[in-house]
Image (cartoon, grey):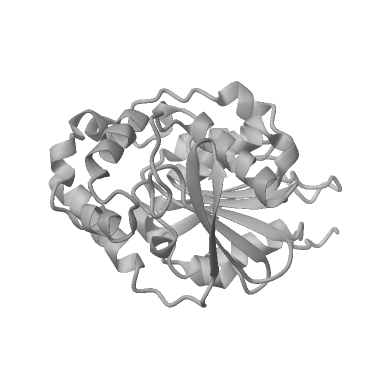
């Protein structure tokens, strides 16, 4: 149990070592927060949403990599990084509404989304609650229901308690950037509560018209059957080469990849994400 958390914490700390081009950082007031964000690159806007306990630096090389072809707008969500916490639970709908308000505040009517883990669920809720704001969304390690987590992870969730995070690299990384360096225990409490949310968004996913690229590792914390069901709900699972256009949504399973290893596959992610966002489809014999 503790080993799992320490591995995740080591991943968070290691992420800060990745090289990045100098981005432009700024803050904007959103729902009582001073939300911090960084902009880099040029082109169509792509909003990047980090995972739980993470921040912009710990997303690593994927941000400057995607910024080679797009204007990447990386956001730090409630209580994370340089964005202050507020007296409000951290929920996926709340965070999605924050992102929608953020887009309005900076004058971005519609954008593509790349989200990882918690950020992927936020991106999914953004597409559900504010579909007019999302062009396409690439979501790495995402579920739409609590039952979608791997059985081992579901068994682990009830054992997650605040004491497990005390003195870990996660806490150290938090203190380096946080507006309130003493606010980590409150953030942990809110994120533990987030883990217990039932989600249950199946009907919402089935109603989506937004193209979604679902990405996960083959050793991720997501149940593979859940991922396949999600892909089918999005219109996937058909057989091609029959003269009909392929579904707009796509599925990618990264081989030999655990949850914390997904972001490390920067080149592979770029090869998957950029053609999807550009609407490009590999040509078959009958195209």
Left or right: 278 in relation to 25: right
In the displayed structure, would residue 280 be above or below residue 30? below
In the displayed structure, would residue 263 be above or below residue 251? below
Name which quarter of the figure residue 208 lies in.
top right
**Position in image of residue 284 (x %, y %):** 78, 61
In the rendered image, is residue 215 in sight? no
Residue drawn at (41%, 64%), measured in percent from left and top? Answer: 57
Residue drawn at (22%, 46%), measured in percent from left and top? Answer: 182
> Which residue occupies the foreground of this view, 135 or 271?
135
**Position in image of residue 78 (x %, y %):** 43, 42
In the rendered image, is residue 81 in sight? yes
Q: Quadrant of the N terminus?
A: top left
> Which residue occupies the foreground of this view, 79 or 6?
79
Residue drawn at (51%, 76%), measured in percent from left and top? Answer: 22
Q: Quadrant of the C terminus?
A: bottom right
Residue drawn at (64%, 31%), measured in percent from left and top? Answer: 128
In the displayed structure, would residue 180 be above or below residue 15? above
Left or right: 247 in relation to 97: right
**Position in image of residue 122 (x %, y %):** 52, 39
Name which quarter of the figure residue 65 lies in.
bottom right
> Which residue occupies the foreground of this view, 85 or 52?
85
Count of number-bearing discs? 0
**Position in image of residue 53 (x %, y %):** 33, 49
């Amino acid at each position: 149990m503790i080993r799992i958390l320490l591995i995740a914490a080591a991943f968070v700390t290691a992420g800060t070592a990745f090289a990045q081009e100098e981005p432009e950082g700024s803050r904007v007031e959103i729902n009582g927060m001073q939300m911090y964000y960084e902009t880099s690159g040029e082109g169509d806007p792509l909003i990047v949403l980090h995972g739980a306990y993470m921040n912009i630096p710990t997303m690593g090389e994927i941000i400057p990599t995607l910024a080679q072809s797009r204007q990447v707008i990386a956001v730090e969500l409630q209580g994370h990084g340089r964005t202050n916490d507020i007296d409000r639970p951290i929920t996926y709908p709340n965070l999605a509404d924050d992102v929608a308000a953020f887009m309005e505040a900076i004058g971005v009517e519609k954008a593509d989304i790349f989200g990882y883990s918690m950020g992927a669920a936020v991106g999914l809720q953004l597409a559900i609650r504010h579909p007019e704001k999302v062009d396409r969304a690439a979501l790495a390690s995402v579920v739409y229901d609590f039952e979608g987590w791997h059985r081992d992870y579901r068994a682990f969730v009830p054992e997650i308690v605040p004491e497990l995070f005390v003195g870990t690299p996660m806490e150290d990384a938090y203190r380096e950037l946080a507006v309130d360096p003493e606010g980590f225990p409150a953030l942990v409490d809110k994120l533990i509560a987030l883990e217990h949310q039932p989600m249950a968004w199946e009907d919402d996913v089935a109603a989506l018209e937004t193209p979604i690229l679902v990405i996960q590792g083959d050793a991720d914390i997501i149940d593979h059957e859940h991922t396949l069901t999600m892909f089918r709900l999005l219109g996937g699972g058909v057989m091609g080469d029959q003269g009909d256009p392929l579904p707009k949504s796509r599925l990618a399973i990264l081989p030999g990849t655990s949850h914390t290893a997904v972001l490390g596959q920067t080149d592979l992610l770029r090869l998957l994400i950029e053609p999807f966002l550009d609407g490009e489809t590999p040509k078959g014999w009958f195209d």
